[in-house]
Image (cartoon, helix red, strand yellow):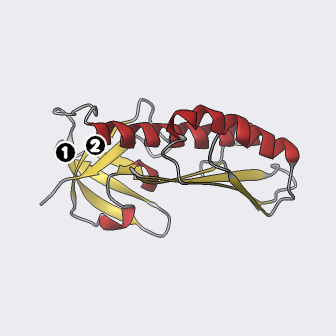
Amino acid sequence: MQIPIQITFRGIGQSNAIESAIRQRATRLERFAHRITRFHVIVDMPHHHRRKGNHYAVRVEVTAPTGEVFVTRDASLDDSHKDFQSVLRDAFDATLRNLESKSQRREGDAKTHAHSPHARVVRMFVNDGYGFLATSAGDEVYFHRNSVLEVPFSQLSVGSKVRFTLAPEDGDQGPRAASVYLLEA
């Protein structure tokens, strides 16, 4: 990759094996390398558990002309006892999807979602980074801050009208949104 990757370790000592795994995953993003101006990966071990094992968190921050992408994956948030490789894979897969989406929108190749359902934000948990949408059918749909596209998560509020796409699998909270777009008032 042309852009040097900055890797930061928090709550865990520096590891050549982890750095190597990160650099290997970063090679999948090489088609965006000419556009990436900043690439920062933070590896954190925020929770040390004697019985349940250690939970890793990986945050990927990428800056490109199409915008900034911030992705965080933390195995302890969904209480699955994922190993480091799973958390790293999930973080880089989400980063790749976000970069592809931003690139397609910039080039005008983005899919139009004419039939995407519309909803309103009915509950927000800003400090925790998630909220719930209410559809016209009265169903509630969970969404995470990482699923909000084109605008910052902080720009949403209770009552905001949005368009969304459902994720293929439900989460622990039931149906979840894969992407959320703020509609202009």
Tell me the tag on residue 81: none
Percent from the top left, x then y, of residue 89?
Answer: 64, 36
The secondary structure type at the circle numbered 1 is strand
The picture quadrant where one finds residue 179 is: top left
Tell which of 85 and 36 is nearer to you: 36
Residue 61 in view of the camera: yes
- For marks 1 and 2, the one nearer the N-term is 1
Query: Are circles 1 and 2 on residues that touch, CB within 8 Å?
Result: yes
Position of the N terminus by quadrant: top right
Disc 1: which residue = 118
- Judging by the rendered image, the residue that carries numbered circle 2 is 164
Report the amino acid beneath label 1. His
Query: Mark 2 is on which residue type?
Result: Phe
Say if 31 sits above or below 78 in the image. Answer: above
Residue 167, quarter of picture: top left
| Mark 2: secondary structure | strand
**Residue 72: x %, y % from top left:** 57, 53
For the residues marked 1 and 2, what is the alpha-carbon distance in whole angstroms?
Answer: 6 Å
**Relative to 71, is 134 on the left or the right?**
left
Task: Please state if 7 lies on the left or on the right of 61 as rendered.
Answer: right
* Disc 2 packing (10 Å; few <14; some 14–19; many ≥20): many
